[in-house]
Image (spheres, helix red, strand yellow):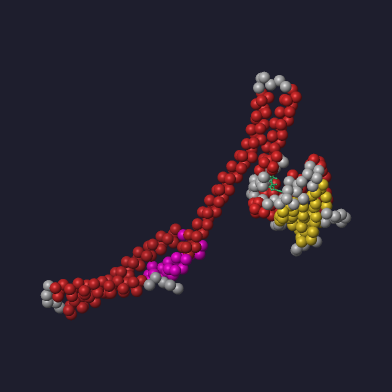
């Protein structure tokens, strides 16, 4: 332990003052040729030395103790830090280290709050940007229809349909936002049960049949899965994951393309569900940010395909809420493979 070595400092100070005094006395007595009693002077010097030593020590001790006490109050150290005034046997180095750690933690906390604030601002900006487009589109059509001079009946229907499509999009974005906020605040409790994964995926294939047909995309398993594969999870949420990944493979897959789902064994009684397409693929620089809210590789293409930019973020939240992992591999121009793990029923 390194205690504050006050007595050393006090000794040094009194020695310095005594030497200074000796020097002044020698110089003045020789210069003014004064007769001087060196015996009295030595006794005086001795008492001066002792008093300077104690005055210095006691005052500095009080001063440092006061400062440490104030600092100790400012920094609520987790473990109580003991300060002792008499003698001042505080381990100063330990105190400084604790103070440094405290300052560092506070610095990190402030940085984190800045980041959160940045995310919040970015998120609000993104939300308003996303909502603005369909609102203005719907409003534009409705204002045109409200015009007294507007008489064309066929155009009226067309404009109403377009306004309705914008409202649908608005509804879709708000639903995704609602889901994200529930997932982020852990409001969406999981209802974990065992279910047959093959049946679930086949159901999603049927659900998306029309959508896939529109872009001539073929949805299929990599092989025949004759026996059920039982997994544990929240069936509704896992269905959402599969829908989002399959919809993306249709949206960003090539026309006449192929989306294949395969189920492979994985470590620790887990299986890996792989969804691969031979679509446009994703450049490597985009991969790390792919699961961020509102992140899109190609803004206009995503909007044109009706995406909210929240699909993959929802996928990640659901998979991680199950304590599972989501993985992505992609080669630009060749295709992408999204996969996630699930726990097998033993
Ligand atoms: P979006 O609503 O834009 O589809 P997502 O969060 O689902 O939002 O996806 C984010 C971005 O990732 C998309 O805009 C798209 O650029 C890219 N992406 C997702 N899936 C694929 C895929 N299978 N092939 C190529 N790009 C994809």
Query: x, y percentage for residue 213?
Result: 81, 42
Q: Is residue 96 visible?
A: yes
> Which region is colored magenta?
75-97
Q: Residue at image x 73%, y 30%?
A: 161
Magenta stretch: residue 68 in it? no
Magenta stretch: residue 93 in it? yes
- Count of marks, rendered view: 0
Indicate whether 167 appears above or below 204: above
Q: Residue at image x 46%, y 68%?
A: 94
Residue furthest front in the image: 333
Looking at the figure, which quarter contains the N terminus?
bottom left
Q: Residue at image x 67%, y 41%?
A: 300
| Quarter-of-image position of residue 340 | bottom right
Main secondary structure type of the part rendered in magenta: loop
Residue furthest right in the image: 226
Q: Is residue 178 visible?
A: no
| Quarter-of-image position of residue 224 | bottom right
Query: x, y percentage for residue 226?
Result: 88, 55
Viewer-nearest residue: 211 or 266: 211
Indicate whether 10 appears above or below 241: below
Query: x, y percentage for residue 75?
Result: 46, 59
Q: Residue at image x 61%, y 39%?
A: 128
Query: x, y percentage for residue 135?
Result: 65, 34
Taking the image as shown, residue 143 lies to the left or right of residue 64, namely right
Taking the image as shown, residue 249 lies to the left or right of residue 149, namely right
Looking at the figure, which quarter contains the C terminus?
bottom right
């Amino acid at each position: 332990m390194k205690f504050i070595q006050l007595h050393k400092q006090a000794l040094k100070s009194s020695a310095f003052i005594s030497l200074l005094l000796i020097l002044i006395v020698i110089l003045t007595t020789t210069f003014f040729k004064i007769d001087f009693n060196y015996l009295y002077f030595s006794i005086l010097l001795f008492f001066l030395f002792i008093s300077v030593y104690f005055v210095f020590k006691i005052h500095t001790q009080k001063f440092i103790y006061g400062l440490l006490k104030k600092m100790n109050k400012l920094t609520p150290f987790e473990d109580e830090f003991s300060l002792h005034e008499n003698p001042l046997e505080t381990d100063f180095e330990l105190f400084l280290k604790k103070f440094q750690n405290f300052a560092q933690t506070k610095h990190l906390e402030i940085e984190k709050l800045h980041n959160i604030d940045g995310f919040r601002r970015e998120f609000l900006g993104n939300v308003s940007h996303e909502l603005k487009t369909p609102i203005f589109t719907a409003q534009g059509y409705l204002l045109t229809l409200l015009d007294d001079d507007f008489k064309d009946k066929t155009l009226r229907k067309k404009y109403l349909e377009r306004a309705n499509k914008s409202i649908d999009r608005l509804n879709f974005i708000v639903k995704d936002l609602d889901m994200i906020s529930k997932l982020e605040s852990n409001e969406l409790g999981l209802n974990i049960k065992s279910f047959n994964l093959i049946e679930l995926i086949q159901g999603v294939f049927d659900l998306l049949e029309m959508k896939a047909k529109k872009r001539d995309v073929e949805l299929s398993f990599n092989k025949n899965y004759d026996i059920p594969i039982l997994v544990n999870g929240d069936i509704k949420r896992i269905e959402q994951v599969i829908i989002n990944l399959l919809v993306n493979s249709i949206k960003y897959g090539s026309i006449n393309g192929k989306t294949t789902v395969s189920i492979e064994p994985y470590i620790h009684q887990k299986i890996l569900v792989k969804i691969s397409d031979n679509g446009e693929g994703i450049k490597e620089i985009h991969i790390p940010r792919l699961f961020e809210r509102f992140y899109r590789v190609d803004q206009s293409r995503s909007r044109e395909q009706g995406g909210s930019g929240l699909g993959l973020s929802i996928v990640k939240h659901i998979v991680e809420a199950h304590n599972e992992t989501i993985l992505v591999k992609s080669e630009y121009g060749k295709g992408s493979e999204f996969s996630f793990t699930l726990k097998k029923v033993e």
